[in-house]
Image (cartoon, rainbow, N blue to C red):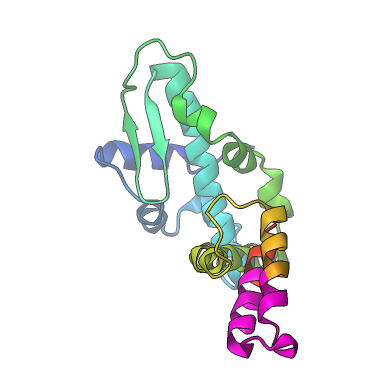
Amino acid sequence: MHNPLISTILELLHQHPHGMSEYEIFKRLGEHEGFSNIGHQGSLPLFQKHFMIMNGLYQLQQSLWDEEHLALDISPLKIFIARPTTEGDAIHPAIAESIELRLYYLDWSNLVETTEEDVIALHQNFWDRLNYDEGRNTALATLDLDEGASSTEIRTRYKKLAAEHHPDRGGNRNQFIEIRKAYELLKTFL
């Protein structure tokens, strides 16, 4: 599928050689005619516009590399065109690093088939993961485990501490609750 945003995105990137965020690109595109078939209510239209921008960026990343040997670096906070730091690279370094994300955005069916419910689930998953990442270190410390603890180590340590601190066995109720909360958080993404 041809993405109608590509030429406008490229023009914006050339106008801002020091880079732009995805949000800035989103704002500059505003009511671009490429968005004419997208609704205005709910989370789905926002996702669809984001998807089209990212699709355009990843298409540009490949074509700029193939045609001009220019590197398009894509991150949420800064997107910019640069000359590669090493000569003779056969593949754009960022293309090799972000293959899964790149493939997702280059597959137009992900735009067409995504529903409002899917977008809501994606948002919830994002917030769950963010909350998990923020609480992970505290939970590991509560269970007296290192950052790289395996799922087996987490379960084993939880069982040991839960047995030691269970209120029915004379343990501290509040400490037992903290141990249980730490385990529940860690096992969410085991």
Quarter of the image where one finds residue 119 = bottom right
Instruction: Give me the residue at 34% from left, 17% from top.
Output: 86
Residue 173 colored in magenta in the image: yes
Q: Is residue 83 above or below residue 172?
A: above
Q: Nearer the viewer, residue 4 or 65?
A: 65
Q: Quadrant of the N terminus?
A: top right
Residue 172 visible at all: yes
The rendered magenta stretch, by its main secondary structure, is classed as: helix
Q: In which quarter of the image is the C terminus?
A: bottom right
- What range of the chain is rendered magenta? 161-183
Instruction: Give me the residue at 69% from left, 64% from top.
Output: 187
Residue 152: x and y in percent read 72, 54
Quarter of the image where one finds residue 73 = top left
Residue 24 falls left or right of residue 51: left
Q: In this view, does 99 lie above or below 190?
A: above
Residue 100: x and y in percent read 62, 38
Q: Nearer the viewer, residue 28 or 23?
A: 23
Residue 188 visible at all: no
